[in-house]
Amino acid sequence: MAEFSGPEQVLEAARQAYAKGYRQMDAYSPFPVDGLAEAIGFRRTRLPLFVLVGGIVGALSGFFLQYYAAVISYPLNVGGRPFNSWPSFIPITFEATVLLAALCAVVGMLMRNGLPRPYHPVFNVQRFERVTRDKFFLCIEATDPLFDEKKTLKFLESLSPANVTTVDP
Amino acid sequence: MSDHTSILRSPLILGNKSYSDVTEDVALPLDRSPGKEWWMAFAVSSSMLFLGLAAVTYQVMTGIGTWGLNNTVGWAFDITNFVFWIGIGHAGTLISAILFLFRQKWRTSVNRSAEAMTIFAVICAGIFPIIHMGRPWLAFWVVPYPNLRGPLWVNFRSPLVWDMFAIGTYFTISLVFWFVGLIPDLATLRDRTASNIKKKFYGLLSLGWDGSNRTWLRYETVYLLLAGLATPLVVSVHTIVSWDFATSVIPGWHTTIFPPYFVAGAVFSGFAMVLTLMIIARTVLHFEEYITLHHIESMGKIIIATGGMVALAYLTELFVAMYSGNEYERFAFINRMFGPYAWAYWIMVSCNVLSPQLLWLKKVRTNVTLVFLLSLAINVGMWFERFVIITISLTRDYLPASWDVYAPTLIEIATLIGSFGLFLTLFLLFTRILPMIAIGEVKGVLSYGRASHEAPKAEGRYVSAAHERVPGGVR
């Protein structure tokens, strides 16, 4: 794992590592760096689809709740109006859509990110504490097919980082 | 705003901060023991809270006969306070969601506390209808659930039920949005603090955040989606609140203009409250370099715009009442302006329509004391707006025989004071426990307008705002 002191450096390093053929790597930073996720070869998340599904389920269940109550469970004739008075069911349907879509978004994000996560090897590195403050890290993982402890270490050193460390599992 | 004579735009954060400085500056107030000012403020706000608690306890035990309501005026102080507090909350969502969608980067310094304000304001608002039920322990009856009474369902065709759904959703989403925004900053605090207990506390709340850019990408995606969802939500909430009135047949309530009118008013009052709180916070906690004059000016401009909409709504309402030829409608407005409660109407007009006009002057907008005073005036004015709409319309409706007057009792006033106490106490505790400024987001805009890792910004605001970050976020 190599430490950098600026967003430009880590971005450049990530691009070089990707060009070199490394794929199993991750970059860590105190704030999102434009293009860094793309540079490490991470291009798309399926989250928006998940949110869309959440929204549709929310809309259907919101409407069905009202339909069930007003038409099936306890039909009440108020001045000869239809039981399924759908226009007045729209506001609650809308709220249920937003509620479920947003909750899906957050839960999906946490799940896909593996949060909450009580343990991660990168936290074993003492200097990594500064990732949430002002330092940027590029970590090439041992699962990468090109990974070779000596060669990878050498490669990282060639990127002129501030520091290079090995992460214990 | 931006300096048009220079290629570079003026920075959002003053004082040439490094990333580390931001962490230190924002986290410092959390480490220091609170100063004298904080304790004084806390003493005042918690006293107000206890006064309110005593009043609420008394009225719950005795019944809402302790209020000044009568057969004619069934909604007055309580619902006024409810609408007032809900409106306050809307500025927080506007700052966090709508300004985010419009890529207004200056929002980063104020969004955290504005969102906190939203949550606390919605809590304050929620209390009022629950007290109004008279038997608050049965409040769960407003929730539709299979029960042994039939099953008897809530009336899904009633705006009051819509309101329950809208506010429940609004509160949940605001809380979730706020928490998502806090995760990276909680991790910052976790990695920074020396105290073991705090490390555990922040560590638990930050869920093991490590700043991985895969994580960041998903995080930004979700943040964008949440902003997109919160935007129509916030409009729907106050729209539905306005339907509580507009769907009735009381002259002065029964108007189609209510939804946009209420939403604009809500944002207007909310921004006034944000300004009030921010000006206090930046002075007491010394955040002048983060919440700069530029921020105060920008919010002042939003106040001019929304204040203009509110003024337009007042005029439209008057015009329609006169033009409609409906004598009840016309009377309702003449009664507002010249009836026994005319003083309330004119307080509303002078605070909401006249006083914000001063903000057109740059001298006023950049004078912190004046802006603070104006924000207080708008808060007062907007409270009176709700009082004017709700109470005055009810006091004199169709039949002169049923006309009545309404005056709040001390219990009701104590409850209002108590809600302010709750709001301020929660806010003061928030400034002690959580970072008031979004550390991660501010770091992202430090280089705003500077030649840096970001693409050159010289082409102008919209070009720079739309670059890489958008596709990165959408993915």
Image (spheres, coloured by chain):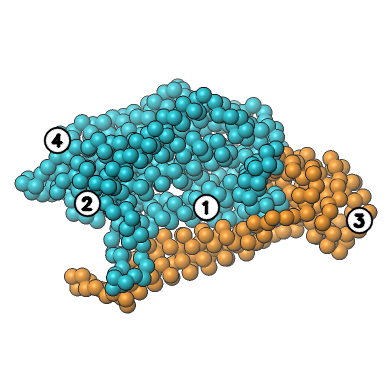
Chain colours: A orange, B cyan
Residue highlighted by disc 1: B176
Q: Which amino acid lies under the numbered mark 2 shown in the image of this protein?
A: His
Comparing labels 2 and 4, the label whose residue is closer to the camera: 4
The image shows residue B6, relative to residue B443, as above or below, that is above
For residue B458, say whether it is visible: no
Q: Nearer the viewer, residue B202 or A162?
A: B202
Chain letter for the residue marked with disc 3 in the picture = A
Residue highlighted by disc 4: B339
What x and y, as percent, mark residue A13? 81, 48
Label 2 and label 4 in one chain: yes
Q: Which amino acid lies under the numbered mark 3 shown in the image of this protein?
A: Glu
Residue at disc 1, secondary structure? helix
Residue highlighted by disc 3: A149
Q: Is residue B417 left or right of residue A77?
A: right
| Marks 4/3: CA–CA distance | 86 Å
What x and y, as percent, mark residue A19? 83, 56
Crowding at dot 3, Cα within 10 Å, few <14 / some 14-19 / many 20+, comes out as few
Q: Nearer the viewer, residue B475 or B201?
A: B201
What x and y, as percent, mark residue B436? 55, 37
Numbered mark located on residue A119 in the image:
none
Residue at disc 3, secondary structure? helix
| Marks 2/1: CA–CA distance | 35 Å
Label 4 and label 1 in one chain: yes
Displayed quadrant of residue A85: bottom left
Residue highlighted by disc 2: B254
Chain letter for the residue marked with disc 2 in the picture = B
Residue at 44% in and 43% down: B120
| Marks 1/3: CA–CA distance | 42 Å
Q: Which amino acid lies under the numbered mark 1 shown in the image of this protein?
A: Val
Q: Which amino acid lies under the numbered mark 4 shown in the image of this protein?
A: Gly
